[in-house]
Amino acid sequence: MRRALLTAVVLALAAPPAGAWPAETMTAVGRDARRLLPRSLAQLLAEREPQIRDQVARFPPELVRALAEDLPTGRLRAETLAALAAEVDGSVALFHERRVSEGLVRLGALLRISADLSDPVLAVGPEGWPPGLTREYYALFDANLDRMPVVLDDPKALELKRAQLPQLWQSLLDRSRAQVPTIREELFRGGRVVSHARLDYRSPAWAMASIAYSHAVTATAATWLAAWREARGDPTRAGRPRLIAPQDAPAPPVADRRSPRPEAP
């Protein structure tokens, strides 16, 4: 009985936060982020996508717990930032030890940090969400992900050094917190939760979901690149986003859109 109880506690700590982005979305974040990487690194990570997906699901429970405690407050504690940075350093250390495959899997799993910090649902304060709202938000996200343009919101983020990553992570949380009021206003009206089926690309809630996804993609690529440079990996032949002006941006097609190319406004 004691062993069963201990196992249940460990599994609870390791589980993703309630309502977090589904595994399919996390995989999509990784695939889009790879488009911004040097070709060699992108290919190495792509070859290990199943292992990375498993590693994301088994992200260190102490980090999951620390993020779950800090997200509602809007501030990442110094000890949380130190623990996240140590996870980055752990992947770099594996490269230095020539345990390349292990290092790549651990590196790939770092996308969990950016994904959680970019999710405004997890960044809500102690007041929480009205019952049913998060279900509709994620349903809106899931139904429209293929239509959401992936925008490189800050090209300079791809040049960050390892020591600058804590600032990036806090900025993600700041921006997620800023989205909370809009999501609440759009998806909770007249005392009722609005069905996601009533919202489309003209809805501010749709825009918030699209922006959150782009934040996750950009930050994931930035984190990977910072660690890769620290490990002295090959930084050449990196993907380049296509610069567009708002008036040049085409309307997203209704179908046949599976893996969008990151763009910068």
Image (cartoon, grey):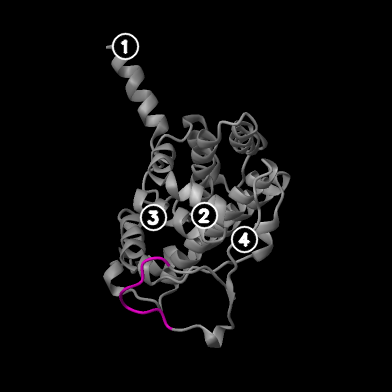
According to the picture, the residue beneath numbered tag 2 turns out to be 118
Q: Position of residue 138 (x, y in %)?
A: 35, 58
Quadrant in which the N terminus appears: top left
The question of residue 148 being in magenta is answered with no
Q: Main secondary structure of the magenta part?
A: loop
The question of residue 258 being in magenta is answered with yes
According to the picture, the residue beneath numbered tag 4 turns out to be 237
According to the picture, the residue beneath numbered tag 3 turns out to be 25
Q: Position of residue 6 (x, y in %)?
A: 36, 18
- What's the residue at 70%, 53% (across, down)? 160
Q: Nearer the viewer, residue 216 or 196?
A: 216
Could you say which quadrant of the image residue 159 lies in?
bottom right
According to the picture, the residue beneath numbered tag 1 turns out to be 2
Q: Residues within 10 Å of mark 4 (few under 14, many from 20)?
A: few
Q: Is residue 41 above or below residue 199?
A: above
Note whether residue 104 is visible: yes
Q: Is residue 101 above or below residue 171?
A: above
| Residue range highlighted in magenta | 251-259
Q: Is residue 123 left or right of residue 27?
A: right
